[in-house]
Amino acid sequence: MRGENEETIFLKDYAETPYAIERVDLDVRIAPDTAIIRALLTLVPRRGTEPGTPLVLDGAETLALRSIAIDGLPLALTAYEATPEGLTVHQPPTRRFVLETEVAVESEKNIKLMGFYRSSGTWCTQCEPEGFRRITYYLDRPDVLAPFKVRMQADKALAPVLLSNGNLVEQGNLGNGQHFAVWEDPFPKPAYLFAMVAGDLGSIHDTFTTASGRKVALGIYCTHGKEDECLYAMDSLKRSMAWDERRFGREYDLDIFNIVAVSDFNFGAMENKGLNIFNDKLVFAKPETATDADYINIESVIAHEYFHNWTGDRITCRDWFQLCLKEGLTVYRDQEFSMDERSRPVNRIEDVRQLRQTQFPEDGGPLSHPPRPDKYKEINNFYTATVYEKGAEVVRMLATLLGEAGFRKGMDLYFERHDGEATTIEAFIKVFEDSSGRDLQHFQQWYLQAGTPELDVVDRYDAAAQTYTLELTQTNPPTPGQPDKQPLVLPIQFGLIGPNGSPMSWTSVSGAEVRDDLIVLDKASATVTFTGIPNKPVPSLLRGFSAPVKLTTNATEADQLFLARHDSDPFNRWQALQDVAMKLMVDAVGGTAWSEAQTSALAEALDETLNSKELDPAYKALALSLPNDQAVARQIATDVDPDRIHAVRGQLITALVARLAPALEKIYLTNDSRLAYSPDFQQTGRRSMKNMALSLLVQGGATDATRLAREQYSRALNMTDRLAALGTVVHAWTDDAQSLLDDFRDRFTADPLVLDKWLSLNAMASDDGVVERMRAILAAPDFPRNNPNRLRALMATFGMNNPTQFARTDGAGFRFLAEFVGDVDKRNPQVAARVLTAFRIWRSYESGRRAEAEKALNALKDSGTLSRNTADILDRTLAG
Ligand code: B3K
Ligand code: ZN
């Protein structure tokens, strides 16, 4: 066993490579079983490199070296050393030279799905973060940039389509049924953005004309027969291209932009230059098999990968510690795109719900890390909600502090100054300092410090002095490896609301930096005093969730209900309803039951929201969705008993439905449309409101509600309605739940992406039979045990979205998940490590469950050799 520090990579150790790569010429001969890859790397020692400094290239166990030469002369055996980790040339030339290697790679055996592999017949690649070293020996790190030229050759019948990055410069037929294509990418890029696809694929084509009038050929490649299901992705791509021009002044830069959908992929999609590769679930959509949520995801991921062309590809990361430089920023960009395409308030609420559901538990548990970490053992474990979603929140705060125009000015400078570079968070912050003249060094701490800040606000009104005071205090609790924290810069958007519901203004304000609607708290505490306040206002704080913090206040339930009616900020209006429901549930779990008056007041506020003429249906659906079990558990934080939470939440829904049933039935009936399906904002909103009403009616035990659900299931015209009805029935585990699940599987046996929905529903059932049923599903001989989508649909869903069965008191849920991780780890470490993160909340359980969780984790630890991915997550989970 190697010592801890030997395996850990530290940011502080960053150093440039002694050699730069000036250009890359690849010649790839693809054939079943084995591909032969000849690489010509033009290398040059960087200034300052001592003569005789060895050249050390990264490699992997996938490479079998067949020949090696420098400037055309084969190397003597003593001149180099090739191991599964890499290739060392002991004494390279002291001037520019060409290293030529030839390796053999077995694509079909590569079930880890990193590097060059075969997915349902199609050859494809995945290189980020460290996959290129599994294709050839290379300086496989993001700060080594080079232009690539790639010649691909394959049997024309097996692989009529040959794709790589950049522009197609030559193609032709050869003897023996072989053909070739040459692709050239003029933009220097790191190897993680390299991609190559070969196969027998269908495709759809379109064009986009850029603002400056260049015509770009767009293509989406897929399994034959799926072409029609790619149209929404194509539409999303064109809208993304137009949006990036409008909003950020960014045009596409090559003549071709291709997307390929593959079935076996470790995550969502990949932004390879000019050749994005996608998990097919984020491309394929038709109304009968894809839900509204699927359409929305496709739109946002297509946009995300496209936006990477500038934030990621043209400007990339110096090292993997800077991952959120491209990811946080690009998530911010895709969130803004979806908001502009759909609805700002609705999307904001959904993004914040996602942040709280995925990032807050990460940041509050053993896997907590800053958006820009300073050490890692396995970089694949840092593609996290913190790097992505919190990273996006940090960019959003920057935009809030600088204002829209100020933020755009900084972004313009970023593109101008760093185009073609591999850079850092510090350089990113610096462009905003230089463009705005503000000191952002303190703000930068958001990138370096882990944990969710807690913001407490207490207000006071002095009628005699007509002053109103807000006492603001921030606390930054310790996280693993970071015991002491600094206060952060918190942009707090706010408003004061007068007794009649309209905004209040003030004559002067002191105590902190306060602009029109923004308090900037940059210390541990501040007292902000407003003068000229004639009546006690109700404050609306953290509007739009302007900082990723946990807010507590001295607001009463009456204040919250007042905000739910009168706040002009739609986010806080929604939040107020959530807060009231949350308080009732948390108190009840703690033994203080709610009163009738409390539930009627909440029901009335909900009813008023539902009747509003100005609110969108999608917004109303969100207003109706009470904090889920996991949200209540997070609020309670310690000694959590998921069964009790589940029961209390059910009781609250029953109490509310007792009052709201007629209103919900009306919503259900008036929004049940038979219109031709469209995934637009209005239609999806109506469906989500209708389906939310249905789910509440069923959960609340309303008469006849399960019959409605059953009927909706069988006569549904689209997957959104069918799945919503089925989900409702499965969630309540009614008598016919199993027969409807069977029916669903039989209807859609041919479609693996629909099978995923079936697997997820099985994993979410709340009855005690669920673990046994899942074991049987996994054990079936035809279960696709190497496909990440299938595995995640079942197991990640179980760990993350079945709070009561995962945390069964007898430990059966914990054991099941841990044993699964041990098994899958042998085949696909990335999937295993990701599923294991479900345990990050294990210390928040009450003592019995905590002991069971610990036992399951220790059994996994003792079960044998684990991959670096899984061992890293497991060690941190047990230690933190
Ligand atoms: N950059 C890729 C993610 C790569 C994940 C590697 N484990 C997709 C994205 O964020 O756009
Ligand atoms: Zn990304």
Image (cartoon, rainbow, N blue to C red):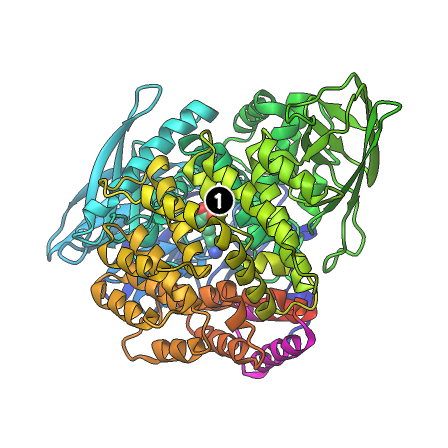
Location of residue 662 in the rendering, given as x and y in whole percent from the top left corner: 42, 48
Which residue: 63% across, 68% down?
877
Relative to 763, is 728 above or below?
A: above
Q: Is residue 130 left or right of residue 106?
A: right
Q: Quadrant of residue 733?
A: bottom left
| Range covered by the magenta-colored residues | 846-870
Location of residue 574 in the rendering, given as x and y in whole percent from the top left corner: 56, 40
Residue 175: say if magenta.
Answer: no
Which residue: 26% across, 65% down?
744
Which residue: 53% across, 49% down?
354
Please state which amino acid type lies under the numbered disc 1: Leu
Which of the two residues, 873 or 558, is positioned nearer the viewer here?
558
Relative to 713, is 320 above or below?
A: above
Relative to 265, is 108 above or below?
A: below
Relative to 570, is 754 above or below?
A: below
Residue underneath mark 1: 622
Location of residue 800 in the rendering, given as x and y in whole percent from the top left corner: 51, 63
Question: Which residue is the extreme one toward the right?
Answer: 464
Q: How many marks?
A: 1
Residue 854: say if magenta.
Answer: yes
